[in-house]
């Protein structure tokens, strides 16, 4: 895979989950699944996909420190690990704020999401010098109004580059401005996934959980084979 780096956001306090009665830790990335934080499984998926470098971001020191503890659970797995404390202006602006830490091409991923390694590979094959690659998911898998069409939801992972990061201020860090610019320029690619997108409410978490559990068995097996 050509893309070797991922920018992983660990923000998201899970307000909608909390309103539904879910006991959310300081971030959705640290919700436990099979006794390990979701961030662990996210990183393991990136590792299995061939990612060699990660930049883990958070909007406060407590999340940075917990992220460091999670990374320690995967010793000597990434060639480079960086932690970036961002100013908390929203996820759309993260690539611009962290651009000095980023390679020419990089995935943007949510730390509470788990993605099939093959999906990263398919996205990587669609990346060209001047486009961006987004992930499209089945709208029937979400329980909140996040649709961009009747049948499609856009959600991380995304595949960006430095040109995109530098352009964000002119696009006002607004996802609709981003979509309009790249779609009108024919520089927008969408790779569809049958896997569920990341979750915002309890119903989505309950839908995702058994699917995640099936995947992490394979992630553990693959990691064991490659690390022996």
Image: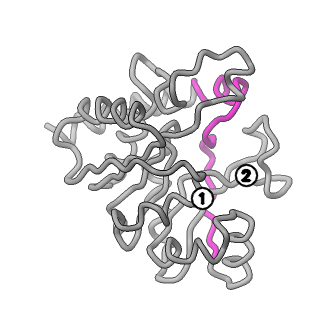
Residue 69 picture location, percent across and down: 29, 29
Q: Is residue 218 above or below residue 5?
A: above
Q: Quadrant of the C terminus?
A: top left
Which image quadrant is residue 177 in? bottom right
What residue appears at the point 48 percent right and 42 percent down from the top-left corner?
Answer: 59
Identify the coloring.
Answer: one colour
Residue 97 picture location, percent across and down: 47, 62
Residue lying at the far front of the rendered structure: 87
Which comes sooner in the sequence, label 2 or label 1? 1
Residue 164 picture location, percent across and down: 53, 74
Q: Is residue 76 above or below residue 55?
A: above
Which image quadrant is residue 45 in? top left
125 or 179: nearer the eye?
Answer: 179
The residue at which mark 2 appears reads as: 153
173 or 137: nearer the eye?
Answer: 173
Residue lying at the far left of the rendered structure: 228
Residue 22 placement, left or right of 81: right
Residue 79 placement, left or right of 211: left
Q: Is residue 196 magenta?
A: yes
Disc number placed over residue 92 in the picture, else none: 1
What is the spatial separation of the Cα atoms under label 2 and label 1, in whole angstroms?
A: 16 Å
Residue 41 picture location, percent across and down: 41, 34
Secondary structure of the residue carrying tag 1 is helix
What residue appears at the point 40 percent right and 30 percent down from the top-left corner?
Answer: 62
Disc number placed over residue 227 in the picture, else none: none
Categorize mark 1 by other alpha carbons within 10 Å: few (<14), some (14-19), many (20+).
some
Q: Is residue 171 magenta?
A: no
What residue appears at the point 73 percent right and 38 percent down from the top-left corner?
Answer: 141
Q: Is residue 18 above or below residue 199?
A: above
What residue appears at the point 46 percent right and 72 percent down from the top-left corner?
Answer: 161
Q: Which residues are magenta?
A: 188-209
Q: Quadrant of the N terminus?
A: bottom left
């Amino acid at each position: 895979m050509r893309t070797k780096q991922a920018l992983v956001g660990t923000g998201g306090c899970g307000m909608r989950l909390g309103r539904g009665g879910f006991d959310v830790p300081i971030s959705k990335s640290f919700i436990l699944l099979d006794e390990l934080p979701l961030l662990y499984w996210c990183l393991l998926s990136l590792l299995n996909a061939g990612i060699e470098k990660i930049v883990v971001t958070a909007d406060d020191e407590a999340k940075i420190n917990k992220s460091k503890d999670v990374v320690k659970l995967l010793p000597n797995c990434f060639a480079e690990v960086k932690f970036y404390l961002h100013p908390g202006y929203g996820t759309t602006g993260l690539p611009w704020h962290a651009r000095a830490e980023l390679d020419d091409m990089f995935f943007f991923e949510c730390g509470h999401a788990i993605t099939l390694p093959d999906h990263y590979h398919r996205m990587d094959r669609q990346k060209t010098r001047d486009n961006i690659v987004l992930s499209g998911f089945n709208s029937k898998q979400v329980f909140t109004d996040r649709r961009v069409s009747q049948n499609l939801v856009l959600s991380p992972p995304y595949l960006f580059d430095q040109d995109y990061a530098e352009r964000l201020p002119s696009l006002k860090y607004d996802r609709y401005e981003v979509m309009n610019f790249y779609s009108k320029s024919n520089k927008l690619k969408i790779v569809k996934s049958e896997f569920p997108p990341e979750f915002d409410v309890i119903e989505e978490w309950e839908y995702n959980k058994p699917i995640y559990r099936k995947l992490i068995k394979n992630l553990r097996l693959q990691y064991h084979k490659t690390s022996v």
